[in-house]
C-alpha cells in the first residue's frame, strides 16, 4: 500500500516542483554553485559552462563562463539525460521514436539557446531568479507568456 | 569538486523526476491555453513557491549572500523602482529574450529541461534539438554576440 502511494507521488509535477525548488536554492550553500546568484539549475547556462570547459581543455578556446564554472564543469545537463535514461529504463518507456520534423527541431534548438543566452536563463532559471526577487525575471516571464501565446496561435493554425 | 558532484546530483534528480512527471515549464501555460489542463502549471507554480520559501528561510538563517545582487551582470542600484527597470535597456532585452524563449520552446514542444529529459527517453527529435541547442550556443558566441554588442 505504502509503496504504491510513493510511486504515485513521484509522478506528480507538484512533487517535482517542490523537490527541485528546494534543491535549486540549497545548491548555493550546500554545493557552492555560486556566484552568480540563483544558479542552482539552468539548462542554457550550465550547458554553456560545460561547453566552455570542454572547448577550453580540447581547443583552448574560451566562450564565456560563470564564475563558479571557471575551473570545474557543471554536469547538470549530463545528469538530466542520465537521470531520464535511468527512469525510462526502469519504467520500460525507453525507445527510439521519431515524431517531429528533424530540420525544424534543429532550428528551434538554435533559437531557444540564442534567446536564452540573451537573458542568461532558461525557463527554469527564470522562475528561480524570480524566487530570488529579480525584477527582470518577472519581465522575462511576462515575455515568456506572450511568446507561448503566439506559439499556441501558430500551433492551432498549422 | 563539490560543484561537479552537486550539479550532477541535481541533474540526476531533475532528470529522474522530470521523466516520471513529464514536467515542463513551458508546457504549463501552453496546456492551460490549449486544453485547459492545469497539472503542469501547478508544477511550475510549486517550483517557484518552494524556491521562494527556501530563499526566505535561508535569508533568515543568514546562509545566503544578499538578495538581488549579481543575479545577472546587471547592477540593480541603477534601477530604484520597477518602472525604471522596465523602461531601461536591459528591461527591454529581458522582455524580448523571454518572448523568443517562449515562442521557440512552444514550437519545439517543451522547455530545454523537458527536451533533455525526452532526449534521454530516446526521442530522436529531441536529440536533434539538443544538437541544435549546443550548436546555437557556439553560434551565439561566434556571431550573434558581436552583432548585439553593436546595439548595446
Image (cartoon, coloured by chain):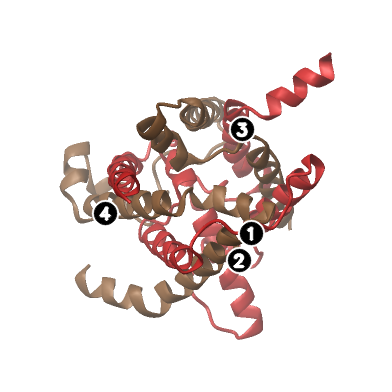
Asked if the residue under mark 2 is in contact with the one under mark 1, i.e. CB atoms within 8 Å, the reply is: yes
Q: Are marks 4 and 3 on the same chain?
A: no
In the rendered view of the protein, which quadrant contains the C terminus of chain B? bottom left
Determine which residue is flagged by label 4: B96
Q: Return the mark for residue A74.
A: 1
Kind of element beneath mark 1: loop
Residue that sits furthest to the bottom in the current view: A59
Q: Residue furthest top?
A: A1
Q: Position of residue B98 (x, y in %)?
A: 33, 50
Q: Chain of mark 3?
A: A
Crowd tier of the residue under label 2, counting other residues whose Cα lies within 10 Å: few below 14, some 14–19, many 20 or above: many
- The chain painted brown is B
Marks 4 and 2 belong to one chain: no
Between the residue at mark 3 and the residue at mark 1, the CA separation in whole angstroms equals 21 Å
Point out which mark residue A50 bears.
Answer: 2
Chain letter for mark 4: B
Amino acid at each position: 500500500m505504502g509503496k504504491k502511494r510513493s510511486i504515485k507521488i513521484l509522478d506528480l509535477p507538484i512533487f517535482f516542483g517542490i523537490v527541485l525548488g528546494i534543491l535549486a536554492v540549497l545548491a548555493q550553500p550546500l554545493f557552492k554553485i555560486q556566484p552568480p546568484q540563483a544558479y542552482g539549475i539552468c539548462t542554457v547556462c550550465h550547458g554553456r559552462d560545460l561547453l566552455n570547459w570542454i572547448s577550453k581543455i580540447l581547443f583552448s578556446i574560451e566562450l564565456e563562463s560563470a564564475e563558479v564554472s571557471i575551473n570545474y564543469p557543471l554536469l547538470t545537463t549530463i545528469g538530466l539525460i542520465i537521470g531520464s535514461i535511468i527512469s525510462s529504463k526502469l519504467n520500460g518507456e525507453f525507445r527510439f521514436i521519431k515524431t517531429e520534423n528533424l530540420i525544424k527541431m534543429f532550428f528551434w534548438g538554435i533559437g531557444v539557446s540564442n534567446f536564452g543566452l540573451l537573458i542568461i536563463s532558461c525557463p527554469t532559471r527564470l522562475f528561480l531568479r524570480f524566487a530570488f526577487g529579480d525584477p527582470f525575471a518577472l519581465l522575462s516571464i511576462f515575455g515568456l507568456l506572450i511568446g507561448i501565446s503566439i506559439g499556441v496561435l501558430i500551433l492551432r493554425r498549422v | 569538486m563539490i560543484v561537479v558532484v552537486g550539479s550532477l546530483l541535481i541533474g540526476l534528480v531533475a532528470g529522474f523526476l522530470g521523466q516520471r512527471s513529464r514536467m515542463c515549464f513551458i508546457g504549463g501555460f501552453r496546456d492551460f491555453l490549449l486544453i485547459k489542463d492545469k497539472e503542469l502549471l501547478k508544477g511550475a507554480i510549486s517550483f517557484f513557491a518552494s524556491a521562494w520559501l527556501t530563499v526566505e528561510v535561508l535569508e533568515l538563517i543568514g546562509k545566503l549572500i544578499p538578495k538581488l545582487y549579481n543575479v545577472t551582470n546587471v547592477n540593480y542600484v541603477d534601477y530604484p523602482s520597477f518602472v525604471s527597470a522596465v523602461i531601461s535597456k536591459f528591461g527591454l532585452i529581458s522582455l524580448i529574450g523571454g518572448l523568443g524563449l517562449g515562442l521557440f520552446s512552444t514550437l519545439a514542444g517543451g522547455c530545454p529541461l523537458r527536451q533533455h529529459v525526452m532526449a534521454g527517453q530516446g526521442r530522436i527529435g529531441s536529440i536533434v534539438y539538443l544538437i541544435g541547442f549546443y550548436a546555437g550556443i557556439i553560434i551565439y558566441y561566434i556571431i550573434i554576440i558581436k552583432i548585439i554588442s553593436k546595439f548595446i
